[in-house]
Image: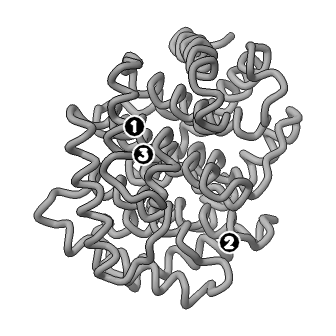
Amino acid sequence: MLDNQIKSQLDELVQLYILMNKKYRWRANDLTVRFGSFLFCLKDKPFDETNFEEVIMYIKNNTGVFSTHRSKSFALAPLLITSFDDAKHAFDHLLDYEKLMRDTGFKKSPYLTIAAYALMLTCPPKQVPQRIAKAYDIYKRMKGNHYWLTSADDYPVAILLADMKDDLGQIESEMERCYHQLNEVGFKKSNGLQFLSHLLTFNPAPAESKAILCQEIVDYLKQRKLGISATYYGAIGFLALLGNDAKKALPEVVTAVNYLKKQQGFKWFNKELNILITASLVCNKYLEDKKHRQMMATTMGISIETMVAAQTAALIAATSAAAATAAASSN
């Protein structure tokens, strides 16, 4: 039976998607509308059309004609509105953080915007310069180990990994252990596998046990005709980072996916994205404190923004949920 909380969220998601799709279908692509609808439901924020339009116009009026912020304003506005009391002021800070990151060595990219957003949510202002510097060092190590797989889509996870207390060598070693252990249990080498290995780095459990759990999650989903490609490995990461709770969460995800696919606007839509959405909602239920819920929102922001920016490129998913659920996974 579908959990009442999840059912309520899914019903709200569907109704808000129908409303937003009707209003914005000619101004934003479908993925962006779904993301906005999801984020308002996840964060339990009412959708205010007037405020939404004002934030979009503010973004467009304060950026250049060719800025990616303008083209992604329908994805960026929900992130800012649901995370900050003053979304316009937050956008100004976002631009400042992007500049600091570019000055350090990061390149201009839609992914840089999401990395700056993650930085705003997870880093005290006084620690921003140090976090950016550490993130850039982590990114360079990623590039050194996997030159062809590493690109701007790894910026957000580098920012979040830089929040770890471990030194650079420890973080790098754990990323590589997770990558190779996942490959050994059957995951093919890919950009999606690299992202999943980064995600699992937040979990202090042994790399071998984390890889086995990921494979068990994949097998469980496949047995229920919910196969998942490398692009959506973030959904596996969500669940794996719940540790012992992962096996309790899996049946809930399957039930939620089956419910969602019967709803208007979701029946024929991308099945894997529905898995990602429902996995996020179910995992969010296991995260009790406010900070963790906030970080889950960053996760979906990263994942869908990547899909919007790169169309069908490797999807970043759930990065900040990793830090949020590290304690749970170690139990």
- Give the answer, above or below, for where 123 lies relative to 29: below
Residue at 55 percent across and 66 percent down: it is: 153
Q: What distance separates the C-alpha of mark 2 from that of mark 1?
A: 44 Å
How far from the left and from the top, in percent, is residue 162?
34, 69
CB atoms at circles 2 and 1 under 8 Å apart? no
Q: Secondary structure at mark 3?
A: helix
Q: Is residue 199 left or right of residue 65?
A: right
How far from the left and from the top, in percent, is residue 274?
70, 32
Write down the quadrant of residue 115 in the picture.
bottom left
Q: Is residue 31 left or right of residue 93?
A: right
Taking depth in this image into account, of 29 and 330 the one nearest to the observer is 29
> On residue 181, which mark appears?
2
Q: Secondary structure at mark 1?
A: helix
**Which amino acid type is shown beneath numbered disc 2?**
Gln
Residue at 55 percent across and 41 percent down: it is: 244
Residue at 50 percent across and 61 percent down: it is: 110
**Which amino acid type is shown beneath numbered disc 1?**
Ile
Q: Residues within 10 Å of mark 3 (few under 14, many from 20)?
A: many
- Give the answer, above or below, for where 102 lies relative to 118: below
- Whether residue 331 is visible here, answered yes or no, is no
Taking depth in this image into account, of 291 and 99 the one nearest to the observer is 99
Residue to which mark 3 is pinned:
298
Write down the quadrant of residue 102 in the picture.
bottom left
Q: What distance separates the C-alpha of mark 2 from that of mark 3?
A: 27 Å
Sequence-wise first label, 1 or 3: 1
How far from the left and from the top, in percent, is residue 220?
79, 40
Sequence-wise first label, 2 or 3: 2
CB atoms at circles 1 and 3 under 8 Å apart? no
**Which amino acid type is shown beneath numbered disc 3?**
Thr
> On residue 56, which mark appears?
1
Write down the quadrant of residue 17 in the picture.
top right
The label nearer to you, 1 versus 3, is 1
